Image (cartoon, helix red, strand yellow):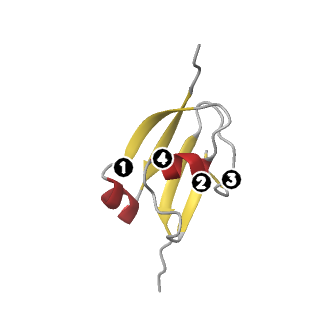
Amino acid sequence: DHLTMKVTLKLTGGFAHTVGFSHRELDVEPGSTVADILDANAIDRARPMIIARNGWAVEPDEPLEPGDRILVSPIFSGG
């Protein structure tokens, strides 16, 4: 039996425009990381970005848990 867990991926700014969606619920393998879902959704990890998991900044190698909410946002500069 193949088990997966649900996580939510939210993209803002240029990421949503490039990938073609801003919000999606995903079924991922247990043990998946943030980097795995970025790669699976063709999100260019070379671009400067802020990644948050349930409201807290994380690195791409952060493991996912069922029900996680991942937000990927470009880094904005202001004046």
Residue type at numbered disc 1: Ser
Q: Which residue occupies the extreme front position in the image? A: 1
Q: Please report contact status of discs 1 and 4: CB closer than 8 Å, yes or no.
A: no
Is residue 45 placed above or below 48 in the rendered structure?
above
Of the two numbered discs 2 and 4 in the rendering, the one whose residue sits closer to the viewer: 4
Is residue 25 placed above or below 14 in the rendered structure?
above
In the rendered view, does 10 fall on the left or right side of 68? Answer: left
Residue type at numbered disc 4: Ala
Q: Which residue is mark 1?
A: 22
Residue type at numbered disc 2: Ala
In the rendered view, does 45 fall on the left or right side of 11? Answer: right
Is residue 45 placed above or below 40 in the rendered structure?
below
Q: Position of residue 43 (x, y in %)?
A: 45, 57
**Circle 2 crowding by C-alpha within 10 Å: few under 14, some 14–19, many from 20:** some
N-terminal label among 2 and 1: 1
* Disc assigned to residue 61: 3
**Circle 3 crowding by C-alpha within 10 Å: few under 14, some 14–19, many from 20:** few
* Disc assigned to residue 52: 2
Q: Please report contact status of discs 2 and 1: CB closer than 8 Å, yes or no.
A: no
Of the two numbered discs 3 and 2 in the rendering, the one whose residue sits closer to the viewer: 3
Q: Which residue is mark 4?
A: 40
Task: Identify the residue at horizontal 59%, vertical 32% (top origin).
Answer: 29
Task: Identify the residue at horizontal 65%, vertical 31% (top origin).
Answer: 30
In the rendered view, does 1 fall on the left or right side of 78? Answer: right
Is residue 41 placed above or below 57 in the rendered structure?
above
Q: Position of residue 51 (x, y in %)?
A: 58, 57
Of the two numbered discs 3 and 4 in the rendering, the one whose residue sits closer to the viewer: 4
**Circle 1 crowding by C-alpha within 10 Å: few under 14, some 14–19, many from 20:** some
